[in-house]
């Protein structure tokens, strides 16, 4: 299968896509991703955002967590099985490594847009196949297009361990309910050596925050970062549209395992 195939399979399992296979309301969607004025977007990923489960993707303002992720082959071709509905579509290929998440400087990135810059939707119908054809719009991603100050709605702070030392490579996930189960709606970029994060969201409201260093969820493994905002129970962070809530610091830990018999 290769490394990319194994990686994508693991991500899909973490995102509970087995439920899709058991759902009779599914259809397929296929297509081919290409680099603009270049070759195929080989061994990349294609991500799908269900229109019914959140706002349209807007990578310059926030990064919405995809509802589904599949890989592309050497020719840039992909195929996904999705629950019927309307989906926004995008694709990316990391400049280095196979990590899933918000695009980084220099990664190839493709948001499927209409001519006026509005995210395009693709219909998936029960028991039918949708072919989106060839989309040749992947270009190198530039962080200069990302809004990080005026006009965005965001939450920021620092992630540290129990001793107050910054935790690097952690991500903050935003949920709309305190149970924080299932798929989160938004995710931050990974923290740097200073442990600082900026979580951009689409609008004001209450958000419950969880931290991990693994994209896609699933049971934590030994050594992985985990934690959440609120010590005894989840505490909501109230964001106001168009402003940034500052000082939302989060404590994290390295998972030590569940004991010798588990």
Image (spheres, rainbow, N blue to C red):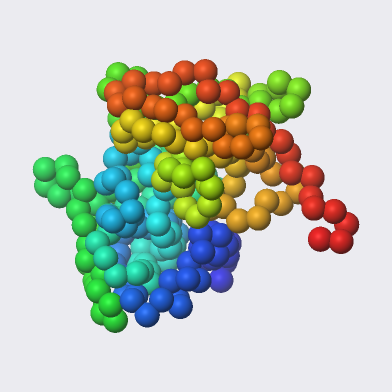
Which residue is located at x 51 percent, y 43 percent? 178
Instruction: State the image quarter where residue 242 is shown.
Output: top left
| Residue 258, horizontal then vertical, whole percent | 80, 53
Q: Quadrant of the N terminus?
A: bottom right
Residue 58 as seen in the image, left or right of residue 12:
left
Residue 188 as seen in the image, left or right of residue 57:
right
Q: Is residue 245 visible?
A: yes
- Which is more toward the observer, 226 or 111? 226
| Residue 248, horizontal then vertical, whole percent | 53, 23
- Which is more toward the observer, 115 or 18? 18
Q: Taking 30 as reference, is 117 above or below it?
A: above
Q: Farthest residue in the right direction?
A: 260
Which residue is located at x 54 percent, y 47 percent? 179
- Which is more toward the observer, 94 or 159? 159
Q: Taking 185 as reference, is 261 above or below it?
A: below
Which residue is located at x 53 percent, y 47 percent? 180
Q: Is residue 190 visible?
A: no
- Which is more toward the observer, 227 or 140? 227
| Residue 226, horizontal then vertical, whole percent | 65, 41
Q: Taking 252 as reference, is 12 above or below it?
A: below
Q: Farthest residue in the front direction?
A: 232
Residue 12 as seen in the image, left or right of residue 259:
left
Which residue is located at x 60 percent, y 28 percent? 250
Label total for image: 0
Q: Quadrant of the C terminus?
A: bottom right
| Residue 113, horizontal then vertical, whole percent | 20, 49
Residue 149 as seen in the image, left or right of residue 249:
left
């Amino acid at each position: 299968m290769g490394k990319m195939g194994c990686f994508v399979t693991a991500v899909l399992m973490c995102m509970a896509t087995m439920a899709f296979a058991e759902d009779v309301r599914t259809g397929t969607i296929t297509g081919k991703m290409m680099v603009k004025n270049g070759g195929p977007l080989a061994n990349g990923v294609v991500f799908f955002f269900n229109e019914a489960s959140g706002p349209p993707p807007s990578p310059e303002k926030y990064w919405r967590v995809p509802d589904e992720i599949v890989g592309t082959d050497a020719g840039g071709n992909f195929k996904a099985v999705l629950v019927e509905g309307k989906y926004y579509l995008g694709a990316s290929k990391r400049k280095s490594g196979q990590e899933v998440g918000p695009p980084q400087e220099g990664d190839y990135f493709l948001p499927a847009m209409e001519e006026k810059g509005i995210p395009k939707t693709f219909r998936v119908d029960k028991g039918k196949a949708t072919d989106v054809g060839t989309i040749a719009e992947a270009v190198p991603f530039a962080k200069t297009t990302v809004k990080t100050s005026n006009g965005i709605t965001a939450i920021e702070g620092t992630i540290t361990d129990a001793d107050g030392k910054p935790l690097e490579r952690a991500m903050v996930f935003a949920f709309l309910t305190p149970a924080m189960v299932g798929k989160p709606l938004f995710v931050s970029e990974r923290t740097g050596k200073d442990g600082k994060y900026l979580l951009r969201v689409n609008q004001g409201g209450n958000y419950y925050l969880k931290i991990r260093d693994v994209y896609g969820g699933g049971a934590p493994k030994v050594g992985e970062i985990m934690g959440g905002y609120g010590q005894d129970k989840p505490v909501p962070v109230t964001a106001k549209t168009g402003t940034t809530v500052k000082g939302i610091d989060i404590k994290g830990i390295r998972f030590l395992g569940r004991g010798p018999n588990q």
